[in-house]
Amino acid sequence: MNLRVLTTLTLFALCIVASNAQQIDPEIKSMAEAIEKKVIDWRRDFHQNPELSNREFKTAEKIAIHLKALGIEVTENVAKTGVVGLLKGSQPGKTVALRADIDALPVEERTDVPFKSNVKTTFLDTEVGVSHACGHDTHTAILMGVAEILSAHKDKIKGTVKFIFQPAEEGPPPGEEGGAKLMIKEGVLKNPDVDAIFGLHINSGTPVGMLRYKVGGTMAAVERFVINVKGKQTHGSAPWTGVDPILISAKIIDGLQTIISREAPLVDEAAVITVGKITSGVRFNIIPETAELIGTVRTLDYNMRDLIIKRMNEMVPAIAKTYGGEATITFQNNTSITYNDPELVKQMLPTLEAVAGKANVVTSKATTGGEDFSYFQEKVPGFYFFLGGKSADTKIAPSHHTPEFYIDEKGLLLGVKTMSQLALDYLNAE
């Protein structure tokens, strides 16, 4: 065989390999399209019957019934109300986890869809409406669809798929554990050990048919902080006879912002310090003894997070002392950085492009919102991306966590196809 023929055949073979690596499995595509209506029906049922964090009892029951009917090994009551399904392929191999969050929010829905939520419940001693105002109902329905597809094609799977239906992504009620952190604590990434994990989040502002992703820090670490300021109570007409904790609070708020504007290297990543609540005083003419400030820190870089927390710990008591008072600050970590493993993204990006079309897979900026999928990513490589849910005729989409939040259900099919293909391509990679 001459060199020209050999070269031609080699290039032809490489083209075939490249083509095969970037094509959606036709059987997966066909089945996803066949069950699209079923996925939408599941979503509508969950949407009409939402349940708050750690209270997803009926939601979990429906998930478990579905997985068991598919012949998937099911573990219930994980992290209180979570459901985990285990699907073993026809050949041994790695283990990949696919995660969907299942909880709703204490938000009264104000849409006109026929499957609108009218659920009411008590949350923190207040009667509230309950709705899937963040799209977790779509995530749950999508993963149920993925489970149905993959369970019907076990012969294509080299390894194991772990389906994680996670409760309390929005945070457990005060005084309770929950969410991804508790699932990990109870061993969800073990038996068998998970090698990689994938998750998606539908987005009301991203057009249907589009996928968005970012390498590295994608969503922020979220810290909740509480500052307690102590002054000296006195009459409002004679402030010089006391120490004003409200004035000290104002100086602390002002000082904290200089950490962002003058100390944080914002050219690397964004960061935010917000004080969202101040409580102090009972009467217009009394300078009170104490004040309480509650707020949040959002960071996308671990070094920057350490710097900001260090400086807050130094600054808060020092400012209070300058004005004659005292102050303490405590932190509570709500989520870590949602960090997309660069190597995993590089490996799986061709799958996203094959399923959605290269032009429909775009990089995006980081967001300072938080996501407890980050706790999984601290333990194993993970890839978290956004799925389009915005209608073509929508100009300005209502934000997540609002009463008007709306998702175009045409976006669910792409989610089913993408998650199914991601699992197969990851497990079957040479």
Image: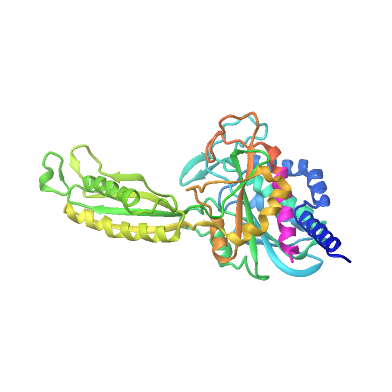
Residue 88 colored magenta? no
166 with respect to 256 (left or right): right
Residue 38 in picture, x, y percent from top left:
77, 43
Residue sitting at the far right: 1
Residue 168 in picture, x, y percent from top left:
56, 53
Q: Is residue 11 above or below residue 118?
A: below
74 with respect to 246 (left or right): right
Q: Residue at x 21, y 49 (%)?
A: 289
Q: Nearer the viewer, residue 134 or 360?
A: 360
The part of the chain drawn in magenta is: 413-430
Q: Residue at x 62, y 66 (%)?
A: 189
10 with respect to 325 (left or right): right
Q: Residue at x 21, y 45 (%)?
A: 247
If the image is split into quadrants, where does the N terminus sit?
bottom right
Q: Nearer the viewer, residue 67 or 418?
A: 418
Report if residue 32 is visible in the image: yes
Q: Quadrant of residue 4?
A: bottom right
Report if residue 87 is visible in the image: no
Q: Nearer the viewer, residue 64 or 274?
A: 274
Q: Quadrant of residue 191?
A: bottom right
Q: Which SS does the magenta portion mostly show?
A: helix
